[in-house]
Amino acid sequence: MTLLSFERYCDEIVAQTEQLVDVVAGAELAAMVPSCPEWTLEQLLRHVGAAHRRVEATVRTRATAFVPDEQVSGIGGPEGADLGAIGEWLREGAALLVSTLREVGPDVEVWAFFGTGSSSFWARRMAHETVVHRADAALAVGAEFTVDTTLGADTIDEWLHICAQPQLMEARPQLRELLGAGRTLHFHGTDAEPGAAAEWLVDLTGDAIAVRRAHEKAAVAVRGPVGDVLQLVFRRQPVSAGRVEVLGDAELLDFWLERVKFG
């Protein structure tokens, strides 16, 4: 279950891309991105634009496997370090992706990370991808990051459920180190609208990671505005920033965050 509709995801891809372009206006493309320490701002922007165009090609061609660069038109973006040109390329790619998504509708089966997915999966994934990298851009230029609480809650929800995918544990065996008796984490976006389901219980006590939307006691609880919980969950903001309240086993939270990463 998702919190938003297919149409809302399509709208957000365009809106979040526009906000991303706006937040970097006047910035130096060579600036480093603190939350992606190996990337410059230019590399971050090109990453987002390439993701949009690759997914557009995936959906348009009904791909059944990962689409390589050479099959994606315009994936590299404009030549040269021209912020204005890169911004237009980002806008064009987002608009192209959304046009294709709306043309095919929400139920087309295509390749996804864990096998067969759908156009709906990619609409949601690209909306959230753009949100998180907008947070990266804001950090790089020293701007405040804010996000609609429902969109932010859905971004957190998707990521926590990706972390619980059995295929991810197969790809990252180190995630098994998280499992153990008494290991539970509760995340709560305190400013979410009623009915937004902005609470999650991450249960590490079994033989796999389990996630459910719930208000339950846990070994460690994280409380704060949705935008700040989002940045913490995605490792864009450290606990030491003091933007969220941590109750209980802070070492378990650190243990989780050290082993779960969003690229």
Image: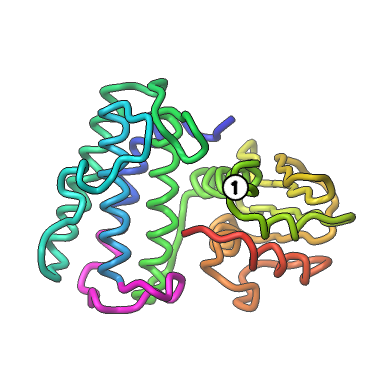
Confirm whether the magenta stretch covers residue 53: no
Given residues 176 and 96, the one toward you in this image is 176
Q: Is residue 89 visible?
A: yes
Q: Is residue 139 above or below residue 209?
A: below
State the residue at coordinates (41%, 50%). 129
Confirm whether the magenta stretch covers residue 36: yes
* Residue under numbered circle 1: 168
In the rendered image, residue 240, in percent from the top left (x then y), is placed at 64, 78
Helix, strand or loop at disc 1?
Answer: helix
Q: Is residue 6 visible?
A: no
Q: Would you say 131 lies left or right of 169 here? A: left
Given residues 128 and 55, the one toward you in this image is 55
User: What segment is highlighted magenta in the picture?
Assistant: 20-40
Q: Is residue 29 above or below residue 181?
A: below
Given residues 226 and 121, the one toward you in this image is 121
Neighbourhood count class around disc 1 (C-alpha, 10 Å): few under 14, some 14–19, many 20 upward: some
In the rendered image, residue 91, in percent from the top left (x then y), is placed at 20, 49
State the residue at coordinates (58%, 44%). 162
State the residue at coordinates (89%, 55%). 181
State the residue at coordinates (26%, 60%). 46
Q: Would you say 15 lies left or right of 257 here? A: left
In the rendered image, residue 160, in percent from the top left (x then y), is placed at 62, 48
How many numbered markers are drawn?
Answer: 1
Q: Would you say 183 lies left or right of 211 here? A: right
Given residues 12 and 129, the one toward you in this image is 129
Quadrant assignment for the N terminus: top right
In the rendered image, residue 182, in percent from the top left (x then y), is placed at 88, 56
Which residue occupies the extreme right position in the image? 181
Please name the amino acid that badge 1 sits on.
Leu
Quarter of image, res 245: bottom right
Q: Is residue 103 above or below residue 209?
A: above
